């Protein structure tokens, strides 16, 4: 038997709850994993509260990522005792996810946790840190370097934003952190921000072109914020867009694209190819300091995850909610 959060059905006549399940109910897969940690992401909060159609079939165990130890494997790439992690691939949407003590998974979804990270550290970084790293890789692929000028991070106090600030800071960029929470200024500066700005300046409909301020940006917000970020990029600048905390819409003009030659790079963590994932996790293992992990994470137990979901959607969580599934 193992414990997991279960969302029973679409009608939600019974709210998600922690239940005990028999291992015989685990889906087909090549590798069985004793899960140690998962996280509570924005998407998991949407799935748990039912605020968006994240879950594609029922019953579903939510949780888009997990880390733990291989118990059994039918493939040579993984053996019992290997420390592994999974991000995305439809976990918590199409396939039973990480908010559980046991999982059975397809081998091609798994990665070995790169040294020196532990399972706890890997999930403290989680999908948020991995997505932030993919955004940094996207900027680098476009030739952005610290010498180009300041880089804006929107949604800076959130999970992706916090790691984006920390990674860019560690790489020597001048980081401008945009937040609606000025009380988090000290936290963001300790992570690596040079300057804090009020997110209100990006959240309303703006002009097609604004003052050229940023050499590049990582945007977690979408909607008017992303449109205004595009309008505020310097000539030839790049924005890596990964989120939709303000909205899925993109009410922008082509002006910054055709008059300033800017580039918009979309970042997807869920179906990102394995070679890029491996590159991202190897850079994370090298760049993320244990002190950053400690500053960003807040650990909760499986039982607490359901109750914290509305706070995630309300943007009230600073950094990451790490879920210790055995607590
Ligand atoms: N593309 C991918 O593969 C991928 C992967 C992971 C996450 N995401 C998406 O990226 C976004 C961030 O994820 P996360 O895990 O970092 O979420 P999070 O921890 O909830 O952070 C989101 C942050 O956005 C800001 N925010 C919230 N509501 C806002 C609003 N209405 N207007 C402007 N800013 C707002 C807040 O930052 P401040 O308080 O600092 O302003 C909040 O902390 C989400 O939309 C998530 O779905 C995408």
Image (tube, rainbow, N blue to C red):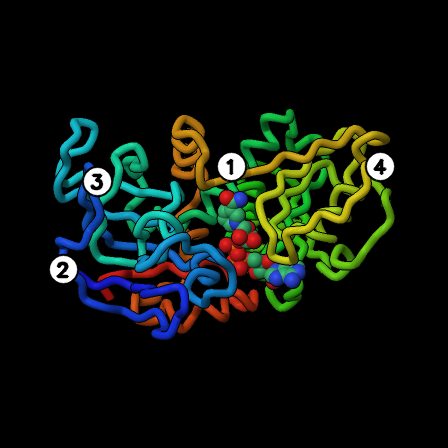
Element carrying mark 3: loop
Using the numbered discs, state the Cα–Cα distance from disc 4 to disc 1 in whole angstroms. 26 Å
Q: Is residue 85 left or right of residue 149?
A: left
Vertical position of residue 83 compared to residue 200: above or below: above
- Labelled pair 3, 4 in contact (Cβ < 8 Å): no
Which quadrant of the figure contains the C terminus? bottom left
Task: Report the mark closest to the observer, 1 or 3.
Answer: 3
Q: Report helix, strand or loop for mark 1.
A: helix
Query: Is disc 3's CB within 8 Å of ligand 1?
Result: no
Image quadrant where residue 274 sits: top left
The residue pinned by badge 3 equals: 29
Q: Which residue is mark 1?
A: 134
Q: Which mark is residue 22?
A: 2
What mark, if any, has residue 213 been given in the picture?
A: none
Would you call the spot at circle 2 few (<14 residues within 10 Å), some (14-19), or many (20 or more)? few
Q: Secondary structure at mark 2?
A: loop
Work out how far the residue at label 1 is from the one at label 2, CA to CA, in angstroms: 37 Å
Task: Check if mark 3's residue and mark 2's residue have beta carbons within 8 Å.
Answer: no
Mark 4: give few (<14), some (14-19) or many (20+) Cα within 10 Å.
Answer: some
Nearer the observer, 60 or 68 = 60
Residue 191 in view here: no
Disc 1 Cβ-to-ligand 1 distance below 8 Å = yes
């Amino acid at each position: 038997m193992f414990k997991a959060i279960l969302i029973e059905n679409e009608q939600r006549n019974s709210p998600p709850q922690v239940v005990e399940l028999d291992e015989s109910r685990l889906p087909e897969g090549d590798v069985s994993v004793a899960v140690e940690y998962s996280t509570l992401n924005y998407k998991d909060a949407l799935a748990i509260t039912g605020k968006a159609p994240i879950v594609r079939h029922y019953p579903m165990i939510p949780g888009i990522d997990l880390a733990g130890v291989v118990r059994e494997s039918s493939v040579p790439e993984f053996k019992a005792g290997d420390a592994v992690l999974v991000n995305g691939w439809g976990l918590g949407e199409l396939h039973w996810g990480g908010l559980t003590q046991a999982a059975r998974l397809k081998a091609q979804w798994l990665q070995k946790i790169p040294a020196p990270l532990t399972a706890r550290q890997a999930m403290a970084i989680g999908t948020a840190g991995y997505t932030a790293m993919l955004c940094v890789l996207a900027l680098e692929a476009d030739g952005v370097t610290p010498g180009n000028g300041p880089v804006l991070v929107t949604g800076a106090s959130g999970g992706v934003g916090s790691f984006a600030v920390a990674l860019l800071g560690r790489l020597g960029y001048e980081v401008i952190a945009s937040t609606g929470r000025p009380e988090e200024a000290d936290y963001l500066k300790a992570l690596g921000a040079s300057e804090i700005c009020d997110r209100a300046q990006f959240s309303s409909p703006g002009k097609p072109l604004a003052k050229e301020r940023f050499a590049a940006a990582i945007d977690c917000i979408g909607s008017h914020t992303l449109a205004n970020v595009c309008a505020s990029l310097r000539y030839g600048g790049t924005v890596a867009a990964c989120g939709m905390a303000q909205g899925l819409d993109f009410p922008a003009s082509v002006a910054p694209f055709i008059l300033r030659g800017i580039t918009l790079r979309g970042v997807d963590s869920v179906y990102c190819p394995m070679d890029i994932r491996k590159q991202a996790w190897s850079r994370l293992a090298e760049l993320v300091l244990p002190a950053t992990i400690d500053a960003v994470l807040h650990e909760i137990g499986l039982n607490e995850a359901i109750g914290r979901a509305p706070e995630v959607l309300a943007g009230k969580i600073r950094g990451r909610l790490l879920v210790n599934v055995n607590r």
